[in-house]
């Protein structure tokens, strides 16, 4: 019943405050629905079986139409991030003509096309720094909820948690990847907020999310979280751009973080993380290192299919390229287990280049945002961009070991970079008070 009440209160309150407070909250509800995923929860039978995400998208279009004059000033093609997203969509569309599994390619392409449309409208809705806070906190809320589900279920499949994923990441590793970027975002808001209630809620959410990473036992997500948090606190400590007592805060965060990890980490988690450095390719069983053989196979496949083979193309051709002495488990038709090689095998060298360029674009525009904010002496906003960048780093590390080329969370993180660039650079003179003019 708690889950149902939480879902309904979030959903209905989101609709109300979208009109009362900010149009960007329409996208925040969409984010929450993604993580709630009621159709796949044990409490799903207690709520009507309708497409809640459809109505949130309809709300996004509605508030955009009602505030068209103001929100249309956010020009999509001025954002290099959106241009790269559209180019990747174009490459997948072209691949339709030669995809080796046409029905699967067309189905997945349709879903990706819808995602790109939603990201385009969301970009229009985010108009101010407060709007950015709304969608970033919504992301944290979603990560907390998914980790709360992991806590409720516990390890139900050996030393892992299964069956808690989202609509586009149903497996345990995908669920961990969806949670992981929220941790560094929560860490940022825990540091800057003066609201004691929010500060307490954020501290609890971080504990839940770290606990979920431990319960799920995802090596890629653990590496992603470690890299992102280390990146963020490094810049907090060594940056010349400082808030009062900032270095003391870093020391406190490190101490509390270490104590928290020691508290939640168990023998199973420690052993699995140690296997990152000890597992080897074996002909007798599939190991974590086996995926490097998949990556080699994808590289060889690209030589024969330089434009890719469409979505799931590697799974189709895998038996022809994976060495026969490599144990791949129950099937030879395996996923490539890396977004980089997924892009290469599905949309070719050009697709891999586009993915790298899109991510580099985020890095480049984040530099411009931080330079602008530094000149304006806006310390909190400067580190907000750092936190967004750190969360993207988290997902990049995680997706190196997973197929997440068309993942919702990946494009959300790119959207955050695009919105930051729009708010802090393209529309630098835009005043937050304009939000009060929105319907």
Image: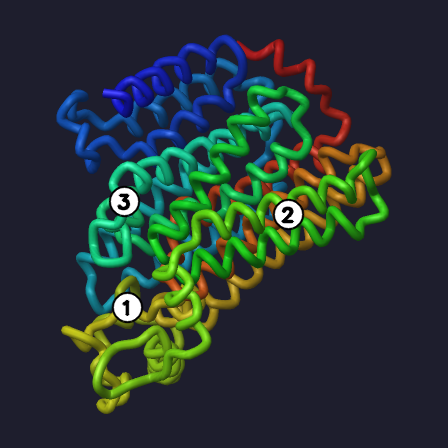
Asked if the residue under mark 2 is in contact with the one under mark 3, i.e. CB atoms within 8 Å, the reply is no
Looking at the picture, how far across and down is residue 209, in whole percent?
44, 42
340, above or below 201, in the image: below
Looking at the picture, how far across and down is residue 187, in whole percent?
59, 39
Q: Label for residue 255? A: 2
Q: Secondary structure at mark 3?
A: loop
Which of the 4 image quadrants contains residue 32? top left
Q: Residues within 10 Å of mark 1 (few under 14, many from 20)?
A: many
In this rendering, would 53 be left or right of 257? left
360, above or below 242, in the image: below
Q: Nearer the viewer, mark 1 or mark 2?
A: 2
Looking at the picture, how far across and down is residue 25, in whole percent?
48, 22
Residue, x 41% and y 17% (percent of image)? 14
Which of the 4 image quadrants contains residue 374? top right
Q: Label for residue 335? A: 1
In this rendering, would 22 be left or right of 128? left
């Amino acid at each position: 019943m708690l889950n149902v009440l939480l879902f309904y209160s979030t959903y209905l309150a989101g609709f109300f405050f979208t009109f009362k407070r900010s149009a960007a909250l329409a996208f925040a509800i969409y984010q929450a629905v993604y993580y709630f995923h009621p159709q796949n929860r044990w409490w799903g039978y207690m709520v009507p079986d309708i497409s809640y995400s459809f109505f949130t998208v309809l709300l996004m279009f509605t508030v955009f139409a009602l505030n068209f004059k103001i929100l249309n000033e956010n020009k999509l093609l001025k954002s290099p991030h959106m241009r790269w997203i559209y180019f990747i969509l174009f490459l997948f569309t072209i691949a339709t003509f030669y995809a080796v599994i046409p029905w699967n390619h067309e189905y997945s392409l349709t879903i990706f096309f819808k995602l790109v449309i939603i990201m385009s409208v969301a970009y229009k809705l985010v108009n101010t720094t407060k709007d950015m806070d709304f969608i970033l906190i919504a992301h944290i809320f979603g990560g907390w909820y998914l980790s709360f589900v992991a806590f409720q279920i516990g390890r139900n499949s050996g030393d892992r948690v299964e069956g808690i994923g989202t609509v586009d990441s149903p497996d345990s590793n995908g669920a961990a990847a969806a949670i992981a970027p929220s941790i560094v975002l929560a860490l940022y808001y825990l540091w800057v907020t003066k609201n004691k209630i929010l500060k307490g809620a954020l501290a609890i959410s971080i504990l839940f999310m770290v606990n979920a990473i431990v319960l799920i036992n995802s090596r890629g997500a653990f590496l992603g979280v470690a890299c992102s948090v280390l990146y963020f606190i490094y810049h907090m400590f060594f940056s010349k751009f400082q808030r009062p007592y900032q270095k003391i805060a870093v020391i406190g965060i490190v101490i509390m973080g270490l104590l928290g990890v020691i508290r939640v980490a168990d023998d199973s988690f420690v052993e699995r993380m140690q296997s990152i450095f000890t597992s080897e390719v074996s002909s007798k069983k599939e190991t974590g290192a086996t995926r490097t053989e998949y990556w080699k196979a994808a590289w060889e496949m690209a030589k024969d299919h330089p434009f890719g083979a469409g979505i799931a193309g590697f799974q189709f051709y895998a038996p022809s390229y994976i060495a026969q002495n490599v144990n791949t488990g129950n099937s030879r038709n395996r996923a490539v287990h890396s977004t980089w090689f997924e892009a290469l095998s599905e949309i070719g060298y050009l697709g891999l280049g586009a993915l790298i360029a899109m991510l580099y674009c985020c890095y480049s525009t984040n530099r411009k945002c931080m330079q602008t904010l530094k000149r304006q002496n806006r310390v909190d906003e400067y580190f907000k961009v750092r936190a967004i960048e750190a969360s993207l780093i988290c997902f990049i590390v995680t997706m190196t070991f997973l197929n997440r080329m068309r993942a919702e969370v990946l494009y959300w993180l790119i959207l955050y970079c695009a919105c930051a660039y729009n708010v802090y650079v393209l529309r630098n003179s835009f005043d937050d008070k304009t939000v009060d003019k929105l319907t």
